[in-house]
């Protein structure tokens, strides 16, 4: 019984979703929708997708009973270890699915946008693995902040284009990728990095990521003999969250909780809590909530986490918030960084700062509902975030050797 | 006044109509009005007023730069409407080219009403297809505004039929698969697209994307009812920099060249 959560009209989630895109792309979006549906109904495709996930990406990821964090939190916290996947995050699921579909459609080139570089690295990885040409659009500001990921993409054989228009960050990288796609759509697929954009991307990305939730549900039942009381994930565009939620949508007793990036705080201008701000609009091809000014100009978002620093949100999340099936709460930079440190110290797991927002949300839930079972999607690992951590915590200065010369 | 009147007039003269685009507020609101008025005086049959938007996915670097300059200058939707009012007062049909979110945010019906009050002819909507446009269609019909949707070389015959059925005023044919911007040669995709469009509608078909010279305009005018020029006008203003008089002179000269082109075909 999934009628509550599936689009009534194709590509629509209530008043959200749709295809707010140039006519030039409509034929390609139709073609993609048909190809995706046929592929998902073809055991040869789904079997190959599962084989790649298993043999190449290290999926299913573990569900880890975080007993030491649980002791501190006062509730049982289970971590879905997507941080252990190849390339370090859940995003490999989405890109392998989309790249495999690209090959099935006979296209030879993929383009992608990236903010921090994680989706770009994942796309470059999938392209290398499946023998596709790959161009990644990245805001100029981000190429400077994330030079290491630019180098990774180069090593994987991708071309990285530094985008100098607009705010020179993720949203402008998406604009530039769309511009490329309009001109190259006959031989190029756009590997969209999150569960946003025009139909079929929100549904397709969800379906490629839903292994997170399906696996976690089965693993939780096996481990605890019951479903969790809540399933928690961070939400930028919302691919890892919708992948997790998809496994639990029909389990009404499982609360679905999304954690948005509140930056300096939702009462400041510097945040990325799109659902919290609750302004209906259009961004990158979908009707959804958008951070915008009085004239409908997109406002720049702010978050310590580049992966959550996006002024829109996937339309199904907007819909789930409106129906009340899922709730969304803002988590500030400070709350996320505190959780980042706590998980590192208690469990020896350094999460991505994105995922640390979900951990922080789980800690809040634990205080509200002591003794409950809270399943958290640890969507990525924190290696890429060490520069930010050094700045935030003032890390990296080794203690001087006090014994020097005393022997 | 509907853009249809300009196309009818051009058709009576046995030539194509010249449609000229500039964003409002570029280089500033008054300068934009002056520039568009100069284009009217030098021979544009329809003026397209761009509504500058933060995320213009159909525009190439030239128009992006102009829109960004306008936004940095603080242009508001009310300024766009003020620009429409001033240009429409010349008697030349004036349409607004806009991405959808600013209209949605302003209020679709409120926008339609205020645009009609300003004397605007209607809207060209690059990221709104008729499938998604129920609220706009209703508002446009109520206020008697043109609904100009885009068709593309990739449009199927079925989509061409449905899209043109939803249009009023004219049909905007995007001649290339790509974003706005001047191109060396006119597209080989334009002719067949116009032909396929004509097969399903009586409405005039304007061709845009890439035209920057009188010769290109003449080439397009041989098979289309309208020649739409944007980036080339924007480029004249950008190149003139702070020398406003030089910019206006360059705009007028380009308009005359293009107007001569649509008459040469």
Image (cartoon, rainbow, N blue to C red):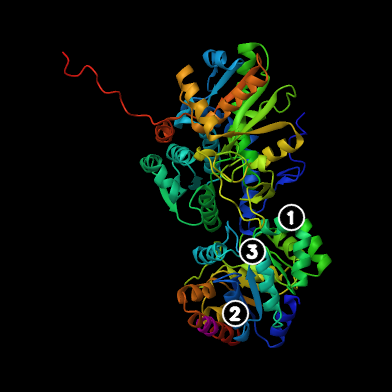
Give the crowd class for mark 2: few <14, some 14-19, many >=20 residues within 10 Å.
some
Q: Which mark is residue B34?
A: 2
| Magenta stretch in the rendered image | B248-254
The numbered disc on residue B131 is 1
Q: Residue at x 67, y 21 (%)?
A: A368
Q: In the rendered image, which quarter is residue A72 located in?
A: top right
Residue A169 position in % (x across, y down): 49, 49
Q: State the image coordinates of residue A270 (x, y, percent, origin top left).
A: 56, 44
Q: CA distance from mark 2 to mark 1?
A: 37 Å
Circles 3 and 1 in contact, beta carbons < 8 Å: no
Front residue of A177/A256: it is A256
The chain identifier of the residue carrying mark 2 reads B
- 3 and 2 marks in contact (CB < 8 Å): no
Work out whether mark 3 precedes mark 2 in sequence or the reverse, and give the earlier one.
2
Please say whether residue A121 is visible from this viewpoint: yes
Q: Tell me the chain of label 1.
A: B
* Residue B252 in magenta stretch: yes
Same chain for the residues under marks 2 and 1 in the image: yes
- What quarter of the picture does the N terminus of chain A occupy? top right
């Amino acid at each position: 019984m999934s009628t509550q959560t599936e689009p009534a009209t194709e590509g629509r989630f209530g008043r959200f979703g749709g295809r707010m895109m140039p006519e030039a792309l409509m034929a390609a979006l139709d073609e993609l929708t048909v190809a995706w549906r046929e592929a998902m109904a073809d055991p040869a495709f789904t079997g190959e997708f599962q084989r790649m996930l298993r043999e190449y990406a290290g999926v299913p990821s573990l569900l880890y009973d975080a007993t030491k964090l649980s002791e501190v939190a006062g509730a049982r916290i289970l971590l879905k270890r997507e941080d252990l996947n190849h390339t370090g995050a859940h995003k490999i699921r989405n890109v392998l699915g989309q790249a495999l579909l690209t090959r099935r459609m006979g296209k030879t080139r993929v383009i992608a946008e990236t903010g921090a570089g994680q989706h770009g690295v994942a796309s470059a990885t999938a392209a290398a693995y499946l023998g596709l040409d790959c161009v990644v659009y990245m805001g100029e500001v981000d190429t400077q902040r994330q030079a290491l990921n630019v180098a990774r993409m180069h090593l994987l054989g991708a071309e990285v284009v530094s985008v100098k228009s607009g705010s020179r960050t993720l949203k402008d990288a998406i604009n530039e990728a769309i511009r490329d796609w309009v001109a190259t759509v006959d031989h190029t697929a756009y590997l969209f990095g999150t569960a946003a954009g025009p139909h079929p991307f929100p549904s397709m990305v969800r379906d490629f990521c839903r292994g997170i939730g399906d696996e976690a549900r089965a693993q939780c039942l096996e481990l605890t003999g019951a479903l969790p009381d809540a399933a928690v994930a961070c939400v930028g565009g919302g691919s890892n969250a919708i992948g997790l939620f998809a496994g639990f949508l029909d389990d009404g007793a499982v609360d679905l909780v999304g954690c948005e990036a509140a930056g300096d705080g939702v009462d400041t201008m510097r945040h990325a809590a799109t659902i919290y701000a609750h302004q209906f609009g259009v961004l990158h091809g979908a009707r959804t909530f958008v951070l915008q000014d009085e004239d409908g100009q997109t406002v720049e978002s702010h978050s310590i986490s580049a992966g959550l620093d996006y002024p829109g949100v996937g339309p199904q999340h907007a819909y789930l918030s409106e129906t009340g099936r899922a709730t969304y709460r803002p988590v500030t930079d400070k709350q996320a960084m505190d959780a980042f440190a706590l998980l590192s110290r208690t469990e020896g797991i350094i999460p991505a700062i994105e995922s640390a927002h979900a951990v922080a949300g789980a800690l809040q839930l634990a205080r509200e509902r002591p003794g409950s079972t809270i399943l958290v999607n640890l969507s990525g690992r924190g290696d890429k975030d060490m520069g930010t951590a050094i700045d935030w915590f003032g890390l990296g200065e080794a203690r001087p050797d006090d014994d020097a010369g005393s022997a | 006044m509907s853009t249809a009147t300009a196309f009818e007039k051009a058709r009576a003269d046995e030539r194509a109509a010249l449609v000229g685009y500039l964003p409002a507020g570029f280089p500033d609101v008054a300068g934009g009005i002056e520039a568009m008025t100069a284009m009217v005086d030098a021979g544009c049959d329809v003026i397209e007023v761009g509504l500058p938007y933060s995320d213009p996915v159909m525009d190439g670097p030239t128009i992006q730069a102009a829109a960004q300059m306008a936004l940095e200058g603080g242009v508001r939707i009310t300024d766009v409407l003020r620009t429409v009012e001033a240009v429409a007062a010349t008697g030349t049909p004036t349409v607004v080219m806009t991405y959808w979110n600013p209209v949605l945010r302003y209020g679709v019906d409120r926008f339609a009403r205020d645009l009609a009050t300003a004397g605007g002819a209607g809207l060209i909507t690059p990221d709104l297809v008729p499938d998604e446009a129920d609220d706009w269609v209703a508002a446009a019909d109520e206020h008697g505004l043109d609904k100009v949707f885009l068709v593309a070389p990739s449009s199927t015959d079925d989509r061409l039929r449905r899209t043109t059925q939803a249009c009023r005023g004219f049909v905007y044919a995007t001649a290339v698969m790509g974003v706005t911007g001047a191109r060396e040669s006119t597209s080989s995709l334009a002719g067949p697209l116009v032909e396929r469009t004509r097969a399903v509608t009586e409405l005039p078909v304007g061709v845009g994307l890439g035209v920057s010279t009188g010769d290109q305009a003449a080439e397009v005018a041989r098979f289309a009812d309208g020649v739409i020029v944007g980036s080339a006008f924007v480029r004249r203003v950008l190149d003139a920099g702070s020398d406003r008089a030089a910019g206006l002179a360059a705009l007028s000269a380009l308009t005359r060249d293009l107007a001569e082109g649509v008459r040469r075909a």
